[in-house]
Amino acid sequence: MVVVLPEGGGETTRAPTIAEIEHVIRRLSNVISTRVSGDQLGEVAEIHVVVEESHNPKQIVRDIESALMSELGLRVDRRKISVALVREAEEPATGHRLRFVSIDLSLDRAKTQARVALGRDDDLFAGVSRAAGPNARQPRLVAEATLAAVEEYLRSITDNGVGRLELADVTEVTSPDGQQAILVAVRVVRAAGEENLLGTALVRDDVWRATACATLDAVNRRLVRLAIA
């Protein structure tokens, strides 16, 4: 529940629910999906929005601020709003960009393991993530294995170290028309400080491939910068 204080103080009004906030945002033009989370104080902590790539993220943020203020009386810091752009088709790998090659997901009573292979030119880079038991969160393992493959690539092109790529979150979101997308948040930890990256991919035939592609989407355009610790 989010607490809303009226302008000028006074008694608190009824707090809009997370569902009400998400409903207002989804009504905005060209928003595919949204996810809102609150903190322990009952305030909005994060707003993640997925929109079509053809739209300006800054304008989307302004539209969200205006809609929440006018319809719910809710003022939200724009720094809490993350906008992810979704492409209709995957772009070919160019420059330092990596391309998805394959996923191998194996399960048994003792563990679940994901192995993701990425490619650049004729070279392959593989990453593995494991968890105990057969009921591990498989999307998270796929994303972690993808980041491990990215780190393997970065180690191959630099002698300075690449810092650390941490998986912050993996979320599956669904638009009102039923289109599914994967949203992946990655935290880059380096000597120069931390950076948060966000990637998305539409789910077509395979949710695991979409998870790997969303993870790549978060880091691919930053690969040259990530190679500089």
Image: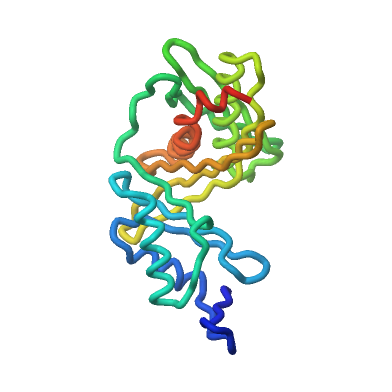
Q: Residue 185: image x %, image y %?
A: 54, 44
The single residue placed furthest to the top in the displayed view is 122
- Using the rendered view, name the quadrant where residue 112 is placed: top right
Coordinates of residue 196 in the picture (x, y in percent): 56, 42
Residue 31 to residue 153: above or below: below
Q: Residue at x 54, y 46 (%)?
A: 170
- Rendered residue at 38%/69% (across/down): 67
107 vs 165, nearest the viewer: 165
Quick one: quadrant of the N terminus?
A: bottom right
Q: Which residue is rendered at x = 47% and y = 70% of the image?
A: 19
| Residue 45: image location, x then y, percent | 58, 61
- Residue closer to the observer: 67 or 85: 67
Tell me the residue at 43%/73% (across/down). Answer: 69
Say which of 167 and 194 sits in front: 194
**Numbered disc total:** 0
Task: Tell me if residue 222 comes above or below residue 50 in the rendering.
Answer: above
> Considering the image in quadrants, where does the C terminus appear?
top right
Residue located farthest toward the front when viewing the structure as drawn: 8
Q: Toward which corner of the image does residue 88 lie, by quadrant?
A: top left
**Residue 38: horizontal and vertical position, in percent?**
59, 65
Q: On the picture, is 172 further left or further right than 45?
A: left
Display coloring: rainbow
Q: Specify whether 111 is left or right of 227.
A: right
Q: Quadrant of residue 39?
A: bottom right
**Image height check: is 147 above or below 1?**
above
